Amino acid sequence: MAKTFVPGSRGITGFLEEEERELLRKLFSDVISMLEPEALDSEDPLVALVGFDPHIAPPSDAALRRLLPDGVKDDDEAALEFRRFTERSLRESKIGALRAASLALESNELHLDENQARNFAMALNDVRLVVSERLGIRTQDDAEAVHAMQEWSDADDLETYLSVVYNFVTWLQDSLVQALSYSLDTGSSRAGKKGEGEGLA
């Protein structure tokens, strides 16, 4: 059974059973498949280099739209122009975090430095966005109904299974973010005290 992430002097540690790690690998892989950009069909190497995609359009899949939201609100033309310049790099950044998180699942005991922890948290958040959309969570009542499904033994259809997955990933992300926040706060405090001591020397 998974254990909460714990901050320490050597980074953040956690524990996941083999079945839980396999589940996360599959979820990360599925989201990567959603995010994989199509190859740019352009003869201009500069266009490919900067990631500009003149033919891009908002995703038709609502879950993918959650991962790649409009960068400008209430202005479809400006949002599309912004998307042409940024979506490809955003996809690649998310894919990078998902792959890094998957690589961190090599053993039951997870040992994450600050950068690995950030990537893992980002990957978990993207999984949550996709599963949330698949479950149609829109209101507080929707969220409470999903939250009620906590046990794997209660998952007897796709919706209840996804609900348990959502709650597991949410719990794991919350645990990791709290550990990362504590680690960053204590690290800043130690750095501040060290600076004060150096100033008195």
Image: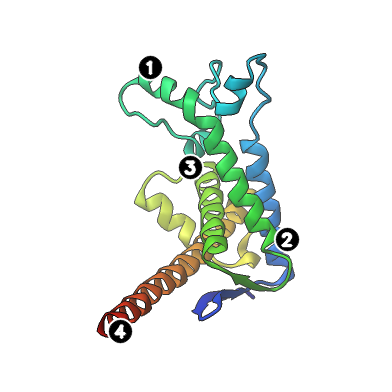
Q: Position of residue 185 (x, y in %)?
A: 36, 72
Asked if residue 39 is positioned above or below residue 10 in the image, the reply reads above
Do the residues bearing badges 3 and 1 touch, measured as CB atoms within 8 Å? no
The kind of residue on which mark 1 rests is Glu
Q: Position of residue 199 (x, y in %)?
A: 27, 79
Q: Which mark is residue 22?
A: 2
Q: Position of residue 193 (x, y in %)?
A: 31, 81
Who comes first in sequence, dot 2 or dot 4? 2
Do the residues bearing badges 3 and 4 touch, measured as CB atoms within 8 Å? no
For marks 3 and 1, give the one nearer the viewer.
Answer: 1
Q: Nearer the viewer, residue 124 or 181?
A: 181
Question: The residue tagged with tag 2: helix, strand or loop?
Answer: helix
For marks 3 and 2, give the one nearer the viewer.
Answer: 2
- Give the CA distance from mark 3 to mark 1: 27 Å
The residue identified by callout 1 is: 77
Do the residues bearing badges 2 and 4 touch, measured as CB atoms within 8 Å? no
User: In the image, 109: left or right of 179?
Assistant: right
Q: Is residue 130 visible?
A: yes
Q: Position of residue 67 (x, y in %)?
A: 50, 40
Q: Residue at x 70, y 52 (%)?
A: 26
- Give the CA distance from mark 4 to mark 1: 55 Å
For marks 1 and 2, give the one nearer the viewer.
Answer: 1
Who comes first in sequence, dot 1 or dot 2? 2
Q: Residue at x 50, y 42 (%)?
A: 133
The kind of residue on which mark 3 rests is Gly
The kind of residue on which mark 4 rests is Gly
Question: The residue tagged with tag 4: helix, strand or loop?
Answer: helix
Question: The residue tagged with tag 1: helix, strand or loop?
Answer: helix
- Give the CA distance from mark 3 to mark 4: 54 Å
